[in-house]
Amino acid sequence: MKFPQLLLDGIPDAVMVVDSEGKGLFANHAATELFGFDVVGQQIGLPLEDFAVVRVPYKGIVKVVELRVADSSEWVKGSQAVVLRDISEREKLRVGLQEKVLELNGFLDLLEMIPTPVVRTDAKGNIEWANTGFTKSFGDAKSLGEVPALATAKSKVLSLFERSPAVAGDNTEAAASDTPGFVEQVFEAGVSEHMPIVVQAVPLNGLEDTKFAVVLNTSAESQELMQTYLNSVFMDSELGIPNRRGLVMQGEADWKDASLEQSVIAVTSPGDDSVEQEMIIVRLVDLIKEQWEEVRQGAAKDEPGEKKMLMRLGRVLGDSIGCLIATPRDSETGAASLADSLAKKVIERGLDRLHVGLVSDTRASTSLELAIEEATLAAQEASSLGKGQHTFTDDYSQIMQQRRELAEAVRASLLHDLTVIIGEGVSSNLASMSRLKRLSRPKCLPVFMTTNWAIFRHPSLFRFFSDSI
Amino acid sequence: MPEMDQKQIEALIKAAAEGKLMLEVDFVDVLTQGDRALSEHIIVTPTLDRLDPLPTLRLIAIPDDAEKVLKKIKED
């Protein structure tokens, strides 16, 4: 008898044997741990099914347990062996996935109802989903097919990534040395003396692979909003659920105003560009800032943040004209080529111009260079169809001047077909696009593209469309 | 009580009524009646106890098939 006991005690799954009356005859260590006490001699019960999912109350929580039953009469007549596996985490994941799917479906339903063409692409620029508004404007989305010249572009992007020092030398020490510059940026971006937010760099120990952490004094509501936002940014592409790379954790309260708590934002992202992460924080600060303003002005908060944002999105998109392309990061090339395909369609349909705003949400995107190259080709191709000039810019240091020139160029040229704006943060790009949209002529179909589906949740997007109405 | 367990019990009562079997059911929610669940030594849910007629019988891994459960309950 000793050998099976030793063997069964060594395996991670809980194993117990019940006699013909359902009383516990044997339980291994894992079973005792699972229930919190030894079940030998206890009236456990006769399993009626060979497989079932049951719940086990344990120290105030309820574990979800998968139960499999096998006949063990050869050992003790009438006995049954029960193998139990704690699937609580898996169940949480399943429920989370289910909720996410419901949320996404609800979101897609919402987008389906509005007349604005909206399309989502994969990393190669292939259309994954398009709403009815898009199909009505451009025909069957599938007919556009795979965007050309992407295989080369993709490999170039990958080689750029390989050369990137941020990826090659990713470690916490290096990240820490980058922190002061980042903090300065955050202060510039979102912190005002009237807003009770304090940003400071914190030690990076304690969290494996933490690129950086920031402490902010925020309200609990802001913490929730930040986590919602981080969840949408750090989405596991396969599972469709947050991959927990961005965490908002409640820290010790260290602020005079009792209604505020301290949040620690930790972004763990060992393969990504640190600039991208900085932008995420900048956007988070934007979110907090906006919310703080709402609180300050006593705005009514009768809807949960996420739902409220979706409602606003539906309203502003529903009233706007244009096309919104959402495509994953580092596929601006795909988006540019897709825009080119759309441009041809627009010209075929007798519209006299197409405005394309390509929104890159990382101002130091490694694919920027390629995006410009591809966008230029796309613009030239559109121009070769007999419609004037194209304009783009890639120099961040002179971006303001170029933006002014760009607006002038748009205003001056009646033949303008394609405007590509790349290389800045979301907010500034949207501001540029907003200006361009105001300059649009009646027979113009503006096309807006974004590299991040999560941008839908970004307040700047709403502001952009709101401004455009 | 999870919705599934509730449905299982409702199906059981309905099947019992159809088979002209008197069934008196006492629910124990382990989340709200933790002490009772502990005193009854309930370690997994759902657990179905037959208290009467004797001998008592305790079942776990309850199937959705109410007929199968009733058959087991009716066994001596």
Image (cartoon, grey):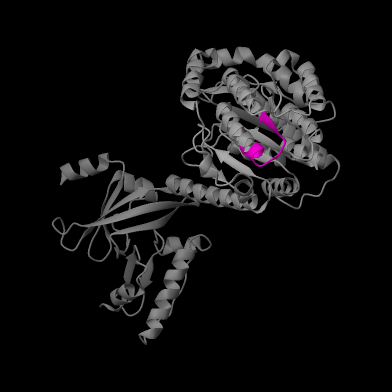
Q: Residue furthest left?
A: A74
Residue A346 is a magenta residue = yes
Question: Hey, which quadrant is residue A395 in on the image?
Answer: top right
Q: Nearer the viewer, residue A407 or A80?
A: A407
Question: Looking at the picture, does residue A72 appear above or below residue A93?
Answer: below
Q: Is residue A259 visible?
A: no
Residue A141's spot in the image, x, y percent? 55, 44
Q: Could you say where residue A277 lies in the image, as x and y percent from the top left?
A: 61, 25
- Give the residue at x 82% y 27%: A411
Question: In terms of depth relative to the viewer, which is nearer, A176 or A440?
Answer: A440
Q: Is residue A97 visible?
A: yes
Q: How many marks?
A: 0
Residue B50 position by quadrant: bottom left
- Residue A414: which quarter of the image? top right
Magenta stretch contains residue A224: no
Vertical order, B69 against A192 (above or below): below
Q: Compared with residue A319, is residue A336 higher up or lower down, i.e. above or below?
A: above
State left or right for residue B23 relative to residue A167.
left
At a point 40% along the width and 75% down the height, the residue shown is B12
Q: Does residue A289 appear to the left or right of A24 in the view shown? A: right
Which residue is at the front of the view, A319 or B24?
A319
Viewport quadrant of the C terminus of chain A: top right
Per the rendered image, the range of residues in magenta is A345-358
Q: Position of residue A233 (x, y in %)?
A: 59, 34
Residue A21: x, y in percent?
A: 25, 66
Please state which of residues A446 and A346 is positioned toward the viewer in this rendering.
A346
